[in-house]
């Protein structure tokens, strides 16, 4: 049975540009912190990658601190600061914040005091895009970067976090983007790497893949590649809306990521849908998640006003640039057939 991967918001295939860049970086011998010729070569390579990522982000002149993940970057920006956020934030952000910001039924968040708050650019589960206010302390760019236009210095936040594996780079490398003049206490202490912001020898191979992937992703976005994916996503949603047991299409009435659908079918648990579709050959994610062995409802859907039962019945379908029309429409057929069977069993 052939498999169809529809979980690109979880992670993406490593693109050819990143593979080539990482292979080349394997030949760089020196440690970027060493002062000899080999070390200087490694340092120059590191700074070249930093400059390339800055250009891709519209962050030339800002600081970029390489980390092991976007989660680590979030900890750097938020630890001990008591910032406010909403229930739609990723756990990597929400774990450091007070969840006090209101979310409307469409998934949009109100931020009365931007300097004391963090707000994501795009939601990983629903795809809902936010308007980022001027002076926002931090934004999670992880899902939006590479899929929608991003210009850090012209946008509102003072800081942003990004991750390589969400746009075709390797897992295990992220970055914190900062406007100049922000004073942060390092989370990882030790050596003076990353301008004293983050101790530990830099992952040159992963950083090389990150820079190459970011450049390629931005070129694709500017060329309109994601508009093609959006048209395919909309065709899939139209097919589902016309089925006998249609889902609720969460967030569909506002701006969303071009590749993301959140489907909610009351009475059909999200984790059950994931397992049934997995057996049918489709990789998707549940709106609900498991934590310490216990199934919990989606905090994103709860924040948007869905009840306890409904919030456990969502799934996320996230397309990629390589997704094929026939596969997507077949997914809609299979999901619709399963929804009818589920409804018959529940009757």
Image (cartoon, rainbow, N blue to C red):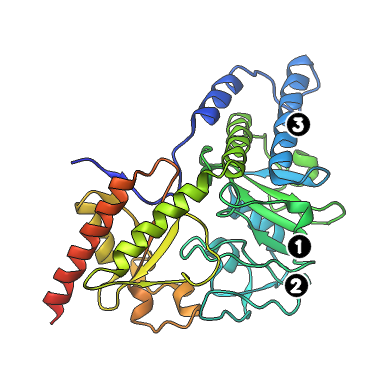
Query: Image point 46% across, 79% down: which residue?
Result: 302
Q: Which mark is residue 178?
A: none
**Of 237 and 14, which appears nearest the observer?**
237
User: In this figure, which residue is indicated by the disc labeled 3?
Assistant: 47
Q: Nearer the viewer, mark 3 or mark 1?
A: 1
Q: Nearer the viewer, residue 121 or 95?
A: 121
Mark sitting earlier along the chain (3/1): 3
- The answer to the question of whether label 2 and label 1 lie on touching residues, with beta carbons closer than 8 A, is yes
**Dividing the picture into quarters, in which one does residue 324 lie?**
top left
Camera-side mark, 2 or 1: 1
The numbered mark at residue 156 is 1
Gap in angstroms between the C-alphas marked 2 and 1:
9 Å
* Mark 2 burial class by Cα count in 10 Å: few <14, some 14-19, many 20+: many
Label 3 packing within 10 angstroms: few (<14), some (14-19), many (20+): few
SS for dot 3: helix
Dot 2 lies on which element?
helix
Quadrant showing the C terminus: bottom left
Of the 4 image quadrants, the one containing the N terminus is top left
- Mark yes or no: residue 216 visible: yes
Q: Earlier in the sequence, mark 3 or mark 2?
A: 3
Q: Earlier in the sequence, mark 2 or mark 1?
A: 2
Say left or right for 337 vs 100.
Answer: left
Residue that label 2 marks: 114
């Amino acid at each position: 049975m052939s498999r169809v991967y529809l979980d690109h918001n979880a992670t993406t295939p490593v693109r050819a540009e990143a593979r080539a860049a990482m292979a080349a970086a394997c030949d760089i011998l020196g440690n970027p912190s060493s002062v000899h010729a080999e070390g200087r070569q490694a340092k120059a390579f590191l700074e070249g990658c930093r400059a390339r990522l800055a250009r891709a982000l519209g962050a030339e002149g800002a600081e970029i601190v390489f980390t092991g993940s976007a989660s680590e970057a979030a900890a750097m920006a938020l630890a001990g600061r008591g910032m406010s956020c909403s229930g739609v934030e990723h756990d990597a952000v929400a774990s450091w914040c007070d969840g006090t910001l209101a979310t409307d039924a469409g998934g949009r968040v109100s931020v009365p005091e931007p300097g004391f708050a963090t707000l994501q650019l795009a939601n990983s589960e629903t795809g809902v895009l936010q308007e980022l206010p001027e002076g926002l302390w931090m934004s999670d760019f992880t899902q939006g970067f590479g899929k929608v236009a991003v210009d850090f210095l012209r946008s509102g936040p003072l800081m942003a976090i990004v991750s390589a594996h969400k746009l075709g780079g390797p897992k295990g490398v992220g970055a914190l983007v900062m406007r100049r003049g922000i004073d942060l206490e390092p989370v990882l202490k030790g050596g003076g790497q990353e301008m004293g912001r983050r101790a530990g020898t830099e992952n040159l191979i992963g950083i090389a893949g990150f820079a190459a992937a970011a450049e390629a992703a931005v070129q694709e976005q500017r060329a309109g590649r994601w508009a093609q994916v959006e048209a395919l996503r909309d065709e899939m949603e139209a097919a589902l809306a016309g089925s006998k047991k249609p889902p609720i299409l969460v967030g569909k009435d506002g701006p969303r990521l071009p590749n993301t659908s959140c489907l909610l079918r009351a009475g059909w648990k999200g984790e059950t849908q994931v397992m049934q579709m997995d057996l049918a050959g489709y990789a998707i994610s549940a709106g609900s998640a498991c934590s310490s062995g216990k199934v919990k409802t989606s905090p994103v859907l709860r924040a948007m006003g869905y009840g306890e039962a409904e919030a456990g019945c969502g799934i996320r379908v996230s397309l990629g640039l390589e997704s094929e029309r026939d596969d997507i429409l077949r997914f809609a057929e299979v999901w619709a057939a399963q929804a009818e069977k589920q409804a018959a069993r529940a009757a």
